[in-house]
Image (tube, grey):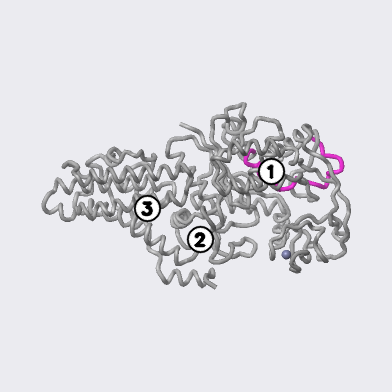
Amino acid sequence: MARFLITSALPYINGIKHLGNLAGSQLPADVYGRFRRAQGHEVLLICATDEHGTPAELAAAEAGQDVRTYCDEQHVLQKRVGEAFGLSWDWFGRSSNPPNHRLTQHFCEVLEDRGYIEERTDRMIYSVDDKRFLPDRYVEGTCPICSHPKARGDQCDNCGSLLDPVELIEPYSVISGSRNLEIRETRHLYLLQSKLQDEIRAWIDTKAVDWPHLTRSIAYKHLDEGLIDRGITRDLSWGVPVTRGGFPRPGFEDKVFYVWFDAPIEYIAATVEWSDATGQDWRRWWRLDAGAEDLTYVQFMGKDNVAFHTVSFPATLIGSGEPWKRVDVLKSLNWLNWYGGKFSTSQKRGVFMDQALELLPADVWRWYLSANAPEGSDTAFTWEQFQATVNKDLADVFGNFVNRIVKFAESRCGGVVPEGGEPGPVEEKLYADVSAALADLTAQMEAIEIRKSAAALRALWVLGNEYLQVAAPWTAIKTDPERAAVVVRTGLNLAALFARAAHPFIPDATAKVAAALGMDWAGPWPSSDARVELSLLPPGRPVASPEVLFKKVEDAQVAEWTERFGGAE
Ligand SMILES: [Zn+2]
């Protein structure tokens, strides 16, 4: 038995996430975590809401709430919808909780003690009327690159350029609209990533061979361009206070750490929260001097987060000089797009997680988003493709097979797993085919190839339907009851096997299949020996049809949803 620490990118606090977000990090992390658990490994699946930064403050202001109340409510909503999607976190924490404050302050102190933090003077936009500095998104103005009139302080949404607020033309305060702004000097802490460049590269060189191409190319692109020192504090009130020796740092009383400094530390801090709540030991998951040496740490994220996880967060951990566990496998994904464009939380474009569950059960979405995981390249969601995938894979292949064989056993075999007869050549061929399909599926799952895993699972299901066509129990039952018993028994075992293999993807439906076949649970993960795996159900065990597992998506529904959510434009 091995141990797997799995984290997925922390969803930002400003509202329920869209399906693109789910597909790019949370769902693949859950599928992988469920798979490793089913294999019998010890898994810790950690996530949290990322609650600091200017977008949280601005969203709270727009909602007319103080930011703490806003975050309290949004955390509960995100946790609830994630659980409704079957995300099987061991802990879903909050970056605003005390453990993250303590750890963030700790890292800053040890980094400074080792010479990797420096105070520098920045020139920042100050709003005279608002009596405060305007970091990042608190200031808007005309883009110096493309002349877009509503560029944000940190980035222009029109041309995509990353900006410094002082570069904006005719800037104004997002809080008051005031143009009475001036540039003032302010002190900030900088993490000297340039001094850690060689150590970071040496570490990446040891790990990158196991990383997907997308992760590797982004990591080396940043290293080759040369790491720049990074401001890790901001002139804000909501966030982790900047301290030194347990007291407010002189001159930093009105500042907090930058959200991108504290958010990854929350992976550790959320594990501390879990530890506090359960009495388990967080150190054996994170400290190399307390047992974390022998585990595999896997991170899941969209490609926009890769630089922060291959360079910035490792700079914090390496620079500390302390024995912290670092990522072993960094699984990054491309974008799931909404038709031609992007899903967008701020522009409310696409289907959001809570809306999706109003339309159809979680398993349907989990399957579609896994079968079309944006791994090799960006992928576009369309209702037509969604309908085709769901109807073909879930209704026609998996659901139909299970219903057909269980109903047959009910109506023609007394509602039990029939006994008698010996497997023949048709079963021998089936064993060989299923063994090969299971070996392929397991290999793809272990490689975290989500889309290929879904394809391998579909191929396994197809073998069941092909077997029933050839073995034709409805004919055999009239002439050769022993032969029919073998086929029905094998078919029921196939249904049980399919459920176990599909459990990481569609946990609710497979639990129903397991119950229909008298199994406690859809696990454990099957071996690649089909002869064994297809003889587990004891003859004589009662079976009963599950309710219809998957209803087909109708054309009328597609038309209605296209109307409601938009579609081809
Ligand atoms: Zn621009």
The front one of 400 and 202 is 202
The front one of 345 and 415 is 345
Give the residue drawn at x 80%, y 43%: 189
From the image, which quarter does the N terminus lie in?
Answer: top left
With 411 as the anchor, is 147 left or right in this view? right
Residue 252 counted in the magenta span:
yes
* Mark 3 or mark 2: whose residue is earlier in sequence: 2
Query: Which residue type carries mark 2?
Result: Ala
From the image, which quarter does the C terminus lie in?
Answer: bottom right
Tell whether label 1 touches label 2 (CB within 8 Å).
no
Q: What number of labels is visible? A: 3
Numbered range of the magenta stretch? 246-268
Query: Which residue type carries mark 1?
Result: Ser
Residue on which disc 3 sits: 458
Q: CA distance from mark 2 to mark 1?
A: 34 Å
Query: Which residue type carries mark 3?
Result: Arg
* Mark 1 or mark 3: whose residue is earlier in sequence: 1
Residue 199 counted in the magenta span:
no
With 422 as the anchor, is 439 left or right in this view? right
Q: Secondary structure at mark 2?
A: helix
Q: Position of residue 9 (x, y in %)?
A: 60, 48
Residue on which disc 2 sits: 356
Q: Which mark is residue 312?
A: 1
Tell whether label 2 touches label 3 (CB within 8 Å).
no
